[in-house]
């Protein structure tokens, strides 16, 4: 099982995140994932660098680790043709080291730029359009496409990698998961393992079978939310910055980080333990990784909100990564 490290543009400035890439590669992480937002999930002391130029710098800074987004939403601000071109270019420059993950997005990535925040059915159809456009462009087609919401007119990519960039789809419900089964090389989720097995695996398999694909060929990736410190209270306090997603969810139209933070501050830190692993014992991390492997995941992407990222990565390098 591969293990990746999530680099959060919301919490750290871009240069610090480049240092995290170097740390991750040196520690033995297999992959690096990064957020792709224009607004963060919090306002106070937050950051929000642009993912695409940062990816080029991160790939140039490193030697072998695979790096990509988790996730890029093709809802309003990004036309699928532009996504296809950007990641084909990165793939051509850094063969075998780039991935792209799509999703149905969040309002904070669209509304600040003047786009409306559509309901989920439209966002799902936009995701389907994007998967079809990107796939056909990466296959070398000249694409005339009139979809549910996205269109292209004789669009061609003149620069493409010899080795195609893996296309992933992220989802936490069966409808988006089915899209992953139909189109994606990999599926990313953060739901608990029981829900994954009971609800999402059948949807993934149904989508693959409808498209005439083998569901076993689809890579399964789990996002694991972790905060580690030798002092449990420090680890718990550190997840306070990430109360926004739990407070407002992914479907609401709230786009202003100040409003998201206001909602998040109404959550107690103890409520964050519903979705985050707060650990002061490395065995807690080993158990979570073992559980993910036993659930059938091929990769775990660790989003660490640990108060000391250097210490967390060092712990992973010394005590955990060699086991996998």
Image: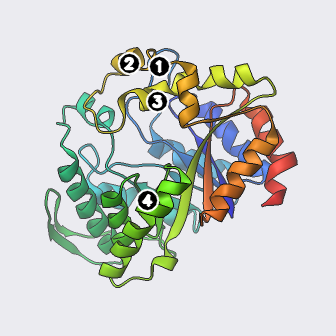
Q: Residue at x 23, y 45 (%)?
A: 76
Query: Is residue 272 shown left or right of residue 288?
Result: left
Picture disc at residue 87? 4
What is the C-alpha distance between the residues marked 1 and 3? 23 Å
Q: Earlier in the sequence, mark 2 or mark 4?
A: 4
User: In front of the other: label 1 or label 3?
Assistant: 1
User: Where does the C terminus fall, quadrant-wise?
Assistant: bottom right
From this view, report whether residue 83 is shown above or below residue 110.
below
Q: Which residue is mark 3?
A: 48
User: In front of the other: label 2 or label 1?
Assistant: 1
Using the rendered view, name the quadrant where residue 109 is placed: top left
User: In front of the other: label 3 or label 2?
Assistant: 2
Helix, strand or loop status at disc 2:
helix
Q: Which residue is mark 2?
A: 263
Helix, strand or loop status at disc 4:
helix
User: In front of the other: label 4 or label 3?
Assistant: 3
Q: Earlier in the sequence, mark 1 or mark 4?
A: 4
- Asked whether the residues under the numbered discs 4 and 3 touch, taking CB atoms below 8 Å apart as contact, a structural biologist would say no
Q: Residue at x 34, y 66 (%)?
A: 178
């Amino acid at each position: 099982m591969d293990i990746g490290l999530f680099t959060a543009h919301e919490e750290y400035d871009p240069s610090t995140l480049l240092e995290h890439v170097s740390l991750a590669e040196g520690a033995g992480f297999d992959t690096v994932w990064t957020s792709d937002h224009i607004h963060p999930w919090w306002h106070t002391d937050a950051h929000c660098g642009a993912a695409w130029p940062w990816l080029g710098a991160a790939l140039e800074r490193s030697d072998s680790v695979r790096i990509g987004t988790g996730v890029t939403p093709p809802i309003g601000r990004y036309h699928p043709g532009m996504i296809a071109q950007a990641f084909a270019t990165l793939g051509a420059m850094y063969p075998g080291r780039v991935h792209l993950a799509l999703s149905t997005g969040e309002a904070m990535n669209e509304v600040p730029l003047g786009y409306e925040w559509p309901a989920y059915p439209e966002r799902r159809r936009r995701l389907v359009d994007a998967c079809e456009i990107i796939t056909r462009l990466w296959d070398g087609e000249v694409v005339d496409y009139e979809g549910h919401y996205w269109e292209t007119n004789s669009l061609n990519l003149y620069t493409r990698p010899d080795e195609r960039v893996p296309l992933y789809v992220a989802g936490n419900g069966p409808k988006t998961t089915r899209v992953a089964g139909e189109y994606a090389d990999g599926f990313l989720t953060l739901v608990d393992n029981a829900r994954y097995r009971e609800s999402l695996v059948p949807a993934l398999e149904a989508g693959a079978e409808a498209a005439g694909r083998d569901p076993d060929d689809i890579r399964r990736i789990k996002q694991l939310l972790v905060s580690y410190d030798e002092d449990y209270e420090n680890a718990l306090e550190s997840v306070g910055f990430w109360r926004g997603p739990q407070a407002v969810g992914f479907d609401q139209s709230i786009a202003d980080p100040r409003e998201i933070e206001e909602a998040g501050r109404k959550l107690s830190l103890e409520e964050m333990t519903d979705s985050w692993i707060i650990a002061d014992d490395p065995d807690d991390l080993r158990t979570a990784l073992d559980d993910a492997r036993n659930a059938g995941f091929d990769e775990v992407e660790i989003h660490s909100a640990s108060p000391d990222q250097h210490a967390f990565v060092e712990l992973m390098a010394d005590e955990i990564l060699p086991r996998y």
